[in-house]
Amino acid sequence: MRIEHNIGKSIILFDSDEQEIGELNYKIIDDEIVDNGIYIERNHRGMGYCRLLIKHWMEIYKNKTIYICSTTKVINKIIIDLGFQQINIPIPYWGIMSNGTNFKYIP
């Protein structure tokens, strides 16, 4: 397992065969960190890789406010477990999506 960080853009997770199995994309907007999509390959879901990517992201930006807009209820539980708070206000880049839930992490 290997994690590659493209600063200011993405965190990519590779398996032992160097195949990409997950990716977290993000933007830095006004010194805050905003999720731009999280994806785990279908046959690797449910194994904790999403949590691993988000935790790694939080460690990198441990002194920054981080926003996630989630459209998946399973992911919402992970996000809350990691210390994010659900918010009912727009977040940078996403605003308020009709099919999503906004979350904010304040260190």
Image (spheres, helix red, strand yellow):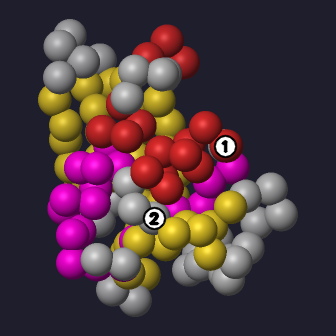
Question: Which residue: 28% across, 50% down?
Answer: 55
User: Is 37 colored magenta in this rendering?
Assistant: no
Near mark 1 (Cα within 10 A), the count class, few <14, some 14-19 or many ≥20, is few
Near mark 2 (Cα within 10 A), the count class, few <14, some 14-19 or many ≥20, is many
Which contiguous range is marked in magenta?
53-71
- In depth, the one of 94 and 58 nearer the eye is 58
Q: Is residue 27 left or right of residue 42?
A: left
Question: Which residue: 21% across, 78% down?
Answer: 63
Q: Earlier in the sequence, mark 1 or mark 2?
A: 1
Q: Is residue 94 above or below residue 19?
A: below
Residue bearing the label numbered 2: 84
Q: Amino acid at mark 2?
A: Phe
Q: Is residue 32 above or below residue 97?
A: below
Q: Is residue 52 above or below residue 34?
A: above
Residue 72: assigned label: 1
**Tag 1 secondary structure:** loop
- Quadrant of the snapshot with the N terminus: top left
Labels 1, 2: front one: 2
Q: Position of residue 36 (x, y in %)?
A: 51, 58
Q: Check contact, mark 1 vs mark 2: CB within 8 A.
A: no
What's the CA distance linking mark 1 and mark 2?
A: 15 Å
Question: Which residue: 43% across, 51% down?
Answer: 81
Q: Is residue 104 left or right of residue 89?
A: left
Q: Residue furthest right?
A: 98
User: Is 69 colored magenta in this rendering?
Assistant: yes
Q: Quadrant of residue 28?
A: bottom left
Q: Amino acid at mark 1?
A: Thr
Q: Position of residue 101 (x, y in %)?
A: 68, 61
Is residue 18 something that shows in the picture? Answer: no
